[in-house]
């Protein structure tokens, strides 16, 4: 008689609930045992946290978070709590999650209409966009559909989810659309009043144009905005966002650029998605969120629960990494030589002598843009974009591929074991949309912005190690990345395990400091060649590392979430008061952030008291000069030259740099931010030029950004002379156009009007010194061309190197005076040495 297995071993027993037991009960376990760290996390969740609505689970990259999330989802199904959804960042990762689920015998589906999902028999694995959009199959408030009742939502790669969530709540009205033109016409006067230069840039279709629409104008013209936008709500560009924003449109921030008008709320109105909001359990899986505040602002998570992450007992489960920044070891190292070195490792011919000393390895380079990728073109075996990733990563995992460049993909790519042995970060992603660009400008010196940058860097560095037995060497190119692993403010924002690896790597770096690439090569060989001493010290460095006991949830982030929710329900005065509480708590710690918060408060005040709102905005300017200007404007403040240039320079340098390496990296970063021929980097160039002035002891400001009119930069060279500077580094023309020449002339007149006592020195940074035939040159104007800029870079770099030669030389006024004079960087010689007169048209 054949045995009826359906009647054996089942009886009336309940389904297994504990995730560890679910794994143990598998007929074919993919691994003999769960990793110790996975077991710790699953037990902690099941025994103490499974009834909490919001749970953050933190494990190092490669710690097996996907399996943890799937087992938690299966446990929830077995418990009968309700339907389970597992969210991954993109379709490529959805496939990876389903493959791992199959190994764990967890039934999954990608179809939200699948009966197995609807009856809580299978986990729905899908991407964020499927849930978070205005036509979500899960239901949106007001769409007439019954929202799906969910037992659990597992958010994988929560750091990646944040960026995508914010994007889903952004309405982008593209240039060329009739609504774009109507909105510009509606707010033309407001934009002109806020910044005449920004308005002119919009009219000229300048790709760098950035013009925030003042909150009072946006709120007061709410009805007109609705009339313009609502007729297009069913169009492709609108239909997935409009249902999410329509009810809070008046609370949104609107920013005009030459490519679009971008409309985005300060916090996503996540309550428009009741399935997510009402889910009984929401589990966030993350590796790199040192700052968990965004889970509160973006997902409406409970801050008290977010602050209590579930972690393994030890953070030693991270694979081995040696992390080096060549430019920090030796500022004179050439990046092109580093690229050659990387190719040699990929080819297995490390010394370039035709003899392969090691086996070829996969080298993966992460770059933020096509422009950055171009620098690798002659060295790379492959350059892959997002669409190439699925097939490309499989090739890397299958065997040697060589040197591969991945364009703008810093998260969601798993490169275990031999898929990547040498990982190189060549830059980090930059803010792309108008709101982010404005925020980056206003919060450039704030720890908030710093934390975001560090998070992106850590995400990128995590691509090459996927478990505790993995190993990878990491090179960071450029001064910005080198600063991130050298400067104490940056380092403190990395995860504990990464901090431990950075500390060990710094000891190695200290031994090869000042040496050439051959020493870098030898250090990398210790890691890649599995030198026993390196392996032992690497393991020891992580042995006693523990995860942070508490998550970081910034008080002002909680306040902004609560304030938005109050305002969205018609309680604007209470919203303003809630932001004021955060301002009071912040005190003097971060003035840039305090000014930014004051602007947010003013926006809420305007709903009921426009006069008080303008007064609050005027106060915000005292803390942060890059917030919106009040209706009555802000009177330009006359720039006063330093009494003694060398003293001002020494004081600035002493205040900003704790050691010589930081000084040299800081100066190098300034010059890296001036990119010729790249319009998108114009803002960076203007800020770098202003900072350069301060490094040299010149009083320096950005009038156009501060007052909406005037030059890009203004330097006080002496009590009697000031340099009026327009930066046209993004230009690619052979001559100086009439509009650019007219702009410089207008800026000179601006200075003459506001400070007639000083002589204006007209200066332009431009790839050409030749005036267009239709242009009239400004009398006495000087041009800084790329060639002369290179000469200036050499002089300032040498100035910094001389000051950094021994401790505290940069704080010595006499030493600084000597170096300024030697390198012709004094106010009376600077533009004579590093600029030239304009030439008439040929």
Image (cartoon, helix red, strand yellow):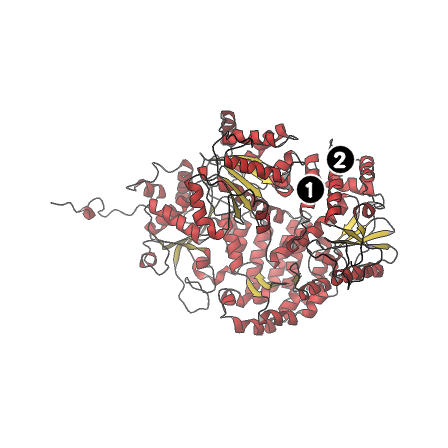
- Where residue 188 sits, quadrant-wise, is bottom right
Query: Which mark sits nearer the N-terminus, 2 or 1?
Result: 1
Can residue 813 be seen by looking at this rendering?
A: yes
Q: How many marks?
A: 2
- Where residue 572 sits, quadrant-wise, is bottom right
For image coordinates 76% across by 63% down, the residue present is: 738
Query: Is label 2 in contact with label 1 (beta carbons under 8 Å)?
Result: no
Locate the C terminus by quadrant. bottom right
Q: Residues within 10 Å of mark 1 (few under 14, many from 20)?
A: many
> Is residue 449 shown left or right of residue 740?
left
> Is residue 192 shown left or right of residue 312?
right
Looking at the image, is 371 positioned above or below residue 137? above
Whole-angstrom CA distance, mark 2 to mark 1, is 14 Å
Locate the N terminus by quadrant. top left
Looking at the image, is 289 positioned above or below residue 215? above
- Mark 1: which secondary structure? helix
Q: Position of residue 733 (x, y in %)?
A: 70, 57
Q: Residue farthest to the left? A: 1
> Is residue 63 shown left or right of residue 426?
left
Q: Position of residue 600 (x, y in %)?
A: 64, 59
Q: Position of residue 351 (x, y in %)?
A: 56, 31
For image coordinates 36% across by 58% down, the residue present is: 111
Q: Position of residue 309 (x, y in %)?
A: 48, 44
What residue is disc 1 on?
668
What residue is disc 2 on?
803
- Mark 2: which secondary structure? helix
Q: Residues within 10 Å of mark 2 (few under 14, many from 20)?
A: many
Which mark identifies residue 699? none
Looking at the image, is 424 positioned above or below residue 205? above
Foreground of the two, 678 or 435: 678
């Amino acid at each position: 008689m054949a045995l009826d297995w359906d009647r054996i071993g089942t009886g009336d027993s309940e389904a297994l609930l504990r995730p560890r037991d679910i794994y143990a009960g598998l007929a074919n376990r993919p691994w003999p045992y769960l990793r110790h760290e996975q077991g710790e996390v699953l037990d902690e969740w099941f025994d103490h946290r499974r009834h909490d609505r919001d749970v953050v689970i933190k494990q190092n990259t490669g710690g097996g978070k996907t399996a943890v999330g799937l087992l938690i989802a299966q446990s929830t199904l077995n418990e009968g709590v309700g339907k389970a959804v597992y969210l991954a960042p993109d379709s490529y990762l959805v496939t990876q999650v389903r493959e791992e689920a199959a190994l764990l015998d967890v039934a999954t589906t990608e179809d939200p209409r699948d009966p197995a999902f609807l009856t809580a028999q299978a986990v729905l694995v899908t991407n964020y966009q499927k849930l978070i959009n205005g036509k979500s199959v899960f239901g949106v408030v007001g769409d007439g559909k019954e929202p799906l009742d969910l037992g659990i939502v597992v958010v994988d790669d929560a750091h990646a989810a944040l960026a995508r969530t914010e994007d889903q709540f952004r309405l982008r009205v593209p240039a060329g659309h009739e609504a774009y033109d109507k909105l510009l016409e509606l707010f033309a006067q407001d934009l002109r009043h806020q910044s005449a230069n920004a308005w002119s840039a919009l009219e000229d279709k300048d790709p760098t144009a950035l013009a925030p629409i003042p909150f009072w104008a946006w709120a007061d013209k709410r009805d007109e905005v609705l009339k313009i936008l609502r007729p297009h709500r069913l169009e492709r560009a609108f239909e997935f966002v409009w249902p999410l924003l329509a009810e809070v449109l008046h609370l949104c921030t609107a920013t005009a650029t030459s490519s679009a008008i971008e409309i985005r709320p300060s916090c996503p109105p996540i309550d428009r998605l009741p399935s997510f909001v009402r889910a009984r359990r929401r589990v966030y899986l993350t590796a790199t969120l040192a700052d968990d505040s965004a889970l509160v602002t973006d997902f409406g998570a409970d801050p008290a629960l977010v602050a209590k992450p579930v972690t393994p007992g030890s953070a030693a489960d991270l694979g081995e990494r040696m992390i080096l920044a060549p430019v920090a070891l030796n500022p004179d190292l050439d990046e092109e030589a580093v690229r050659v070195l990387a190719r040699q490792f990929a080819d297995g011919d490390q010394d370039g002598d035709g003899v392969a000393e090691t086996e070829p390895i996969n080298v993966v380079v992460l770059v933020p843009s096509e422009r950055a990728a171009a620098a690798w073109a002659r060295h790379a075996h492959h350059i892959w974009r997002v669409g190439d990733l699925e097939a490309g990563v499989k090739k890397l995992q299958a065997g040697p591929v060589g040197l591969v460049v991945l364009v703008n993909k810093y998260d969601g790519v798993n490169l275990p074991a031999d898929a990547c042995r040498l990982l190189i970060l060549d830059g980090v992603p930059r803010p792309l949309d108008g709101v982010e660009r404005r925020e980056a400008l206003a919060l450039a010196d704030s720890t908030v912005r710093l934390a975001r940058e560090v998070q992106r860097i850590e995400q990128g560095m995590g691509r090459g190690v996927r478990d505790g037995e993995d190993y990878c060497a990491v090179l960071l190119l450029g001064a910005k990345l080198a600063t991130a692993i050298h400067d104490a403010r940056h380092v403190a924002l990395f995860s504990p395990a990464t901090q431990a690896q950075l500390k060990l790597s710094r000891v190695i770096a200290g031994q090869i400091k000042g040496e050439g690439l051959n020493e870098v090569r030898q250090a990398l060989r210790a890691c890649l060649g599995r030198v026993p001493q390196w392996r032992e010290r690497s393991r020891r460095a992580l042995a006693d590392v523990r995860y942070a006991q508490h998550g970081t949830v910034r008080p002002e982030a909680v306040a902004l979430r609560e304030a938005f929710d109050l305002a969205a329900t018609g309680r604007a005065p209470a919203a303003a008061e809630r932001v004021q509480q955060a301002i009071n708590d912040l005190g003097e710690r971060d003035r840039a952030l305090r000014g930014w918060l004051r602007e947010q408060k003013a926006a809420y005040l305007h709903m009921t008291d426009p006069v008080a709102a303008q007064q609050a905005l005027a106060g915000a300017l005292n803390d942060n000069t890059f917030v919106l200007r009040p209706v009555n404007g802000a009177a330009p403040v006359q720039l006063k030259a330093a009494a003694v240039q060398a003293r001002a320079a020494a004081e600035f340098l002493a205040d900003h740099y704790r050691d010589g390496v930081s000084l040299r990296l800081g100066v190098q970063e300034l010059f890296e931010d001036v990119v010729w021929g790249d319009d998108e980097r114009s803002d960076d160039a203007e800020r770098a030029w202003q900072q350069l002035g301060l490094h040299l002891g010149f009083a320096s400001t950005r009038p156009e950004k501060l007052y909406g009119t005037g030059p890009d930069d203004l330097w006080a060279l002496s009590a009697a002379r000031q340099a009026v500077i327009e930066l046209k580094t993004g230009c690619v023309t052979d001559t100086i156009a009439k509009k650019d020449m007219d702009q410089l002339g207008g800026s000179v007149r601006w200075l003459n009007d506001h400070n007639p006592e000083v002589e204006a020195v007209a200066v332009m940074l431009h790839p050409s010194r030749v005036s267009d035939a239709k242009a009239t040159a400004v009398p006495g104007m000087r041009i800084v061309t790329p060639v002369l800029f290179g000469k200036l870079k050499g002089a300032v770099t040498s100035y910094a190197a001389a000051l950094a030669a021994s401790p505290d030389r940069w704080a010595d006024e006499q030493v600084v005076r000597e170096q300024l004079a030697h390198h012709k960087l004094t106010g009376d010689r600077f533009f004579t040495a590093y600029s030239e007169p304009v030439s008439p048209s040929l």
